[in-house]
Image (cartoon, rainbow, N blue to C red):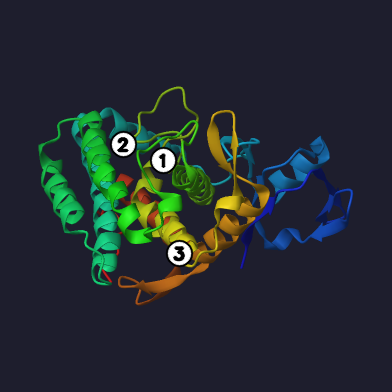
Amino acid sequence: MKRSLYILNPGQIKREGNTLVFISQEEKKALPVETIDSLYIFAEVTFNKKLLEFLSQKKIPVHFFNYYEYYVGSYYPREYMNSGLITLRQAEYYLNKEWRLGLARAFVYGALANMLFNLRTYSSRGKDLSTQIATIEDDMRQLNQAQSPAELMAIEGQARQAYYEAFDVITADPEFSFEVRSRRPPANRLNALISFGNSLLYVTALSEIYRTHLDPRIGYLHETNQRSFTLNLDLAEVFKPLVVDRVIFGLLNRKEIKTNDFAEEMGGIYLKEKGVRKFLTAYEKRLSETIMHKGLGRKVSYRRLIRLECYKLYRHFLGDELYHPYIRTR
């Protein structure tokens, strides 16, 4: 099974024969290209045109993050699976106000439903989350009244505020209190974890879209504008509660992430390298975790679920079946 490869140390990536090698001051390590789905670069790494040509040949995208773990861009190999027909259909669905609104509403519905799944799961374990559950249930009832993606985003933001208030109840750790959502820069440790995890999921969704006929530049909930990619942001909304948030809850409840895994820089709180490594390990483990898929009658990984979501959108654009977001129910 192919996996994402994370580069956290400075060095050089080269092609040697039919594989990759990573060279740093400490070591020279072979990276079997057959096992790599995508590359995530967090450190100062050098490479040449020959390597990029090889990565394109092997259809491996490369995603870059800066010193503060913010996603800054991707090397996206030639879109070998893009279909002109699907791109036209995606554009048609974007330009038709009613069709776009229907898709945007589906993404928000999936996000809220999966937030509720998390809250009900922890409620069944004795956490008092009745207020947050009631708030999000009320927000869900408002979705059909929204007349634009902007109104849907406002409802989603309102629901997510109540949802984030539940984090302190779920984790019960004053060292990781939520307080208020802050992004650039993250104002506290919990916000740093949320921002980092969300960035990872955006890129994971982008990599999965790359393996399909979909065009990642055309989104429906998130405005298609000067930003390079938006469809991955739409898909990520559905899976944030099931992937990113569950990784965070697990790390904090098992006491695997500690206060000394963070540093304060430039007015914000960021993960140190050892904290990044802990998060990436837990994140990859979550993506590989399998659950029963009712429609397929077999277990699939969370990473595969994101790809399946792309295929559902593909069939939606072709008019074969309406898109319904993945919702975890058990």
Q: Amino acid at mark 2?
A: Leu
Q: Amino acid at mark 1?
A: Leu
Q: Is residue 320 visible?
A: no
Q: Of 102 and 190, which appears nearest the observer? A: 190
- Image disc number at residue 154: none
Alpha carbon separation for disc pair 3 and 2: 29 Å
Name the kind of residue labelled 3 in the image: Gly
For residue 221, the mark is 2
Q: Is residue 182 above or below residue 23?
A: above
For the residues bearing labels 1 and 2, Cβ distance under 8 angstroms: yes
Is disc 3 surrounded by few (<14), some (14 to 19) or many (20+) residues within 10 Å?
Answer: some
Q: Residue at left 29%, top 57%?
A: 114
Query: Which residue is the site of mark 3?
Result: 250
Q: Position of residue 267 (x, y in %)?
A: 54, 29
User: What residue is rendered at 45% in x and 64% in y?
Assistant: 250
Residue in the image at 52% along x and 47% along y:
200
Q: Earlier in the sequence, mark 3 or mark 2?
A: 2
Q: Quadrant of the N terminus?
A: bottom right
Quarter of image, res 28: bottom right
Are the two marked residues, 3 and 1, in contact with CB atoms closer than 8 angstroms? no
Residue receiving disc 1: 233
